[in-house]
Amino acid sequence: MTNRITLTKQKQFSKHMLLIGLFYIIVPLLLIGIVAFIRQANRLLWIFTVLSFGSVIFNLWLTARWEIVSIYLRPLFPVLFVIACVVGYKRIKKRNTQTKRIVYILNITINTIIIIFISGINWFSIKGYSAP
């Protein structure tokens, strides 16, 4: 009976580890795809988007358990993010259309909150790595 319970717990644990591993791959790739392929209205919105998404990707890169997924995928995400930034910068819309003021303010506000929150988490993570 105990072997059966242990086996069930191991299966549940492996399912959770698979979901966590997929999360470590899907979220950065989704954010990199948004930076690369969604056109931004102007440079300011692009900068805030890149900073907020970059801080989330850096947090996952810094704190994720890469032995679950693959240690060889870890250096791939910063390279892909830099490439996505270059592609996204070239895709900034021309000034022919004016963005609505509320969308502009809401985008900057949400991205600023994300930048501050995730940067604080990153700071504590780096501080934890430096402490013995």
Image: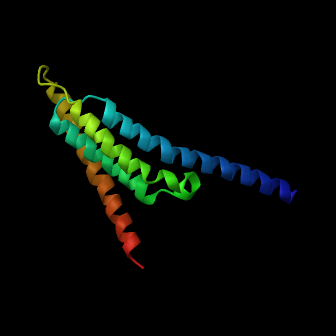
Left or right: 87, with 14 as reference point: left
Q: Residue furthest right?
A: 1
Could one spot residue 53 in this view of the protein? no
Q: Residue at 77%, 51% (x, y): give it.
A: 8
Q: How is the image coloured?
A: rainbow
The image shows residue 108 at horizontal and vertical percentages of: 20, 39
The image shows residue 115 at horizontal and vertical percentages of: 27, 50
Left or right: 51, with 15 as reference point: left
- Choose top left, top right, bottom left or bottom right for residue 61: bottom left
Q: Is residue 14 above or below residue 40?
A: below
Left or right: 46, with 53 as reference point: left
**Quadrant location of the C terminus in the rendered image:** bottom left
Q: Residue furthest bottom?
A: 132
**Quadrant location of the N terminus in the rendered image:** bottom right
Q: Nearer the viewer, residue 16 or 74?
A: 74
Could one spot residue 12 in this view of the protein? yes
Q: Residue at 49%, 48% (x, y): give it.
A: 24
Q: Nearer the viewer, residue 85 or 128?
A: 85
Left or right: 91, with 78 as reference point: left
Q: Residue at 35%, 34% (x, y): give it.
A: 34
